[in-house]
Amino acid sequence: MSETLQSGFIGHLIELRNRLMKAILSILVIFVALVYFANDIYAFVAAPLIAHLPENSTMIATDVTAPFFAPFKLTLFVALFAAVPMLLHQVWSFIAPGLYKHEKRMLIPILCSSVLLFYAGISFCYFVVLPIILGFFTSVGPEMMTLSPDISSYLAFTLKLFFAFGVAFEIPVAIMVLCWSGATTTASLKEKRPYVVVGAFVVAMFLTPPDVLSQTLLALPMLLLFELGLILARFYSKDTNSQETVE
């Protein structure tokens, strides 16, 4: 019996290793395919800032290696973001054999929606939030100041915002999982709505740069996504899950 358990445990470890290798390989393949366009990718990400820079003003590099490593680093993160569907596929392939049929029917929409929401968060940040924030910050300040942002600092700024909004847009998925697992209910979450409002602004304070504008632009979508999660969680409550299991 112990030998059977040991062989089963080793088999799971081998399967986990293979899934991790495939996940890492998918990131590397995408990165190799995109690295040639590293400068173009950086130019695309920097476009919202360039559009608000004063005339005859450009971005600068304060480090000798920054013109190479900044686009290189950005391309690596783009490859990681682009590989999210493949990464989740590997996770699903690893856990799916141990799930019941009704659990698979529940989790497949959740995994798909989590990918779409993550990309939606990044898109919202790029097309809506960045133009507003950068337009505001480039329009304030002393007139004698010449704005020439550093490419590495801008990269760190945008990556932090992309990650914050991508994770924040996963709130509906998190609520559905909590209600589906029975950890909480929609009624309980509705009662805690005032605390959620305060918590959204606290979380936004830690995830975004230290300014009220970007914090508000993150907190408000989080609150809307919380309400959306409450609506969708009605279909993923523990009672619904148990009824489907009985059927």
Image: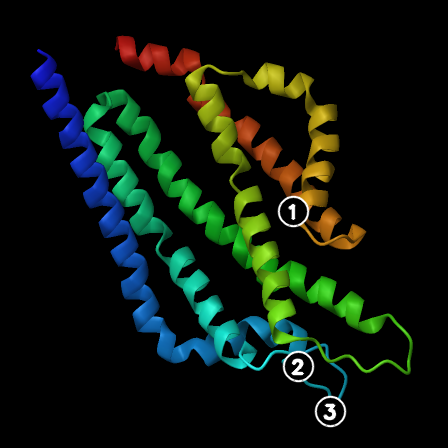
Residue that appears at 66% across and 74% down: 49
Q: Amino acid at mark 2?
A: Met
Q: Looking at the rendering, in which quadrant would you find the N terminus?
A: top left
Nearer mark to the viewer, of 1 and 3:
1
10 Å crowding of disc 3: few (<14), some (14-19), many (20+): few
Q: Eyeballing the image, is 37 above or below 201? A: below
Q: Which residue is mark 2?
A: 59
Q: Which residue is mark 3?
A: 56
Residue that appears at 76% across and 52% down: 210
- Which quarter of the figure has residue 14? top left
**Tag 3, which secondary structure?**
loop
Q: Return the residue nearer the eye: 238 or 64.
A: 64
Q: Eyeballing the image, is 151 above or below 133? A: below
Q: Amino acid at mark 3?
A: Asn
10 Å crowding of disc 1: few (<14), some (14-19), many (20+): some
Q: Return the residue nearer the eye: 39 or 182.
A: 39
Q: Which residue is mark 1?
A: 207
Q: Residue 100, image x and y in percent?
A: 23, 20
Compute the Cα span from label 1 to label 3.
Answer: 33 Å
Callout 1 touching callout 3 (CB < 8 Å): no
Residue that appears at 13% across and 31% down: 11
